[in-house]
Image (cartoon, grey):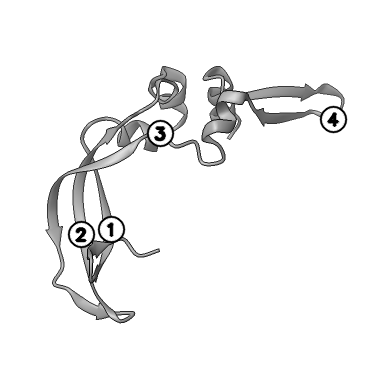
Amino acid sequence: MTKQLNALVAAQLLTVAVERDIHASRYTTTDAGARVAPRFCYGNRIVTTIDTFTPPTPANGFPETQVTYHYTMQDVPVWAKSTEVLAAFPAMAQATSGNAADKATLAGTITGWQVPD
């Protein structure tokens, strides 16, 4: 976790204060980090292909299906493209690679298929 936090320090989203007497470090957000904290959004998924889906079955009062899809990321900020951040967060590196895949459950509603909360 320290490697990940230090990568965010290098990206100028966090600052670190080291307490040498008690062997601890305190990480706080910078002004830039506060704008994207606490989840540090690194873009928006754009679905490129739907690879598979299950037949819709009733669940929680709505038809639901399991979908496997490929996506690309849009609006990826500069800090999320840095070498240090990509090395520290391999899942983010994969997600922003341009050829990522995932699975989701979709529920059919009056307004169309949506990811349930």
Of the two numbered discs 3 and 2 on the same chain, state the one appearing first in sequence. Answer: 3
Q: Are marks 4 and 1 in contact (CB under 8 Å)?
A: no
Q: Nearer the viewer, mark 4 or mark 1?
A: 1
Numbered circle sitting on residue 42? 3
At horizontal 56% and vertical 19% (from top left) the residue drawn is: 12
**Mark 4 or mark 2, which is nearer the start of the sequence?**
4
Q: Which residue is mark 4?
A: 22
Q: Could you tell me if the residues under marks 1 and 2 are in contact, i.e. CB atoms within 8 Å?
A: yes
Identify the secondary structure beneath mark 3.
Answer: loop
The kind of residue tagged 1 is Ala
Please name whichever residue, 24 or 104, is drawn nearer the observer in this view of the structure.
Answer: 104
**Looking at the image, residue 63 lies above or below residue 35:** below
Q: Nearer the viewer, residue 91 or 35?
A: 35
Q: Which residue is under mark 1? A: 104
- In the image, which is nearer the foreground, mark 3 or mark 2? 3
**Which residue extends farthest right?**
21
Task: Label 2, secondary structure: give it.
Answer: strand
| Vertical arrangement, residue 45 with respect to residue 89, above or below | below
What numbered label is drawn on residue 67?
Answer: 2
> What is the three-letter code of the residue carrying label 4?
Ile
28 vs 115, left or right, is right
x, y percent for residue 68:
20, 55
Splitting the image into 4 quarters, where does residue 44 fall? top left
Mark 3 or mark 4, whichever is nearer to me: 3
Query: Does residue 90 appear to the left or right of 68 in the view shown?
Result: right
Q: Nearer the viewer, mark 3 or mark 1?
A: 3
Going by the numbered disc 3, the residue's amino acid type is Tyr
Measure the C-alpha gap from mark 3 to mark 2.
23 Å
